[in-house]
């Protein structure tokens, strides 16, 4: 999944949620604009990533990307580690999580 963040709106107040508007994503044609709500601390992580990314030589304009066509292997490893730390069984792939979220959203909005 490659996601491009075109606009980010976040108040400076620490306790409010921040809204990220995802303008370009894999299923934009079917589902349209996506939104992610983050706490202020999580939003600061995104801002830090963008600042660090500027110092590198980005190969594209995507916020999240991988060099290959497959899953980002490091991300899968970290997701599986967090999954195990929560005491959940199995070893999900990112596609498993994406499918679960997409199914939930599809049910929730109909």
Image: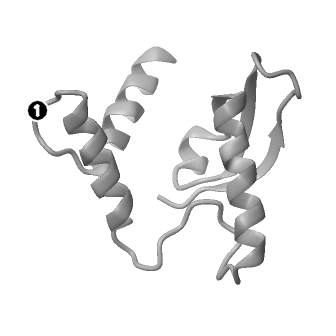
Q: Residues within 10 Å of mark 1 (few under 14, many from 20)?
A: few
Residue 89 visible in rendering: yes
Residue 110 visible in rendering: no
Q: Which residue is mark 1?
A: 89
Asked where in the image residue 32 lies, by quadrant, the reply is top right
Instruction: Single out the residue that lies furthest toward the left.
Output: 89
Residue 88 against residue 46 in the figure, above or below = above
Q: Nearer the viewer, residue 52 or 97?
A: 52
Say which residue appears at 17% left-offset and 29% top-offset.
Answer: 88
Left or right of residue 91, residue 23 in this image: right
Asked where in the image residue 98 lies, by quadrant, the reply is top left
Residue 59 against residue 13 in the figure, above or below = below
Say which residue appears at 57% left-offset and 60% top-offset.
Answer: 64
Asked where in the image residue 62 lies, by quadrant, the reply is bottom right
Say which residue appears at 75% left-offset and 28% top-offset.
Answer: 18
Left or right of residue 17, residue 31 in this image: left
Determine whether the residue tagged by mark 1 lies in a helix, strand or loop: loop
Left or right of residue 76, residue 102 in this image: right
Residue 53 locus on image (x, y percent) = 70, 69
Residue 16 locus on image (x, y percent) = 77, 17
Residue 54 locus on image (x, y percent) = 78, 72
């Amino acid at each position: 999944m490659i996601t491009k963040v075109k606009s980010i709106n976040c108040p400076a107040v620490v306790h409010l949620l921040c809204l990220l508007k995802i303008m370009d994503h894999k299923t934009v044609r079917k589902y349209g604009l996506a939104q992610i709500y983050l706490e202020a601390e999580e939003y600061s992580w995104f801002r830090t990533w963008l600042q660090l990314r500027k110092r590198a030589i980005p190969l594209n304009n995507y916020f999240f990307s991988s060099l290959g066509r497959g899953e980002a292997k490091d991300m899968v490893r970290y997701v599986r580690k967090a999954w195990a730390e929560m005491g959940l069984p199995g070893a999900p792939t990112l596609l498993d999580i994406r499918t679960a979220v997409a199914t939930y959203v599809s049910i929730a909005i109909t």
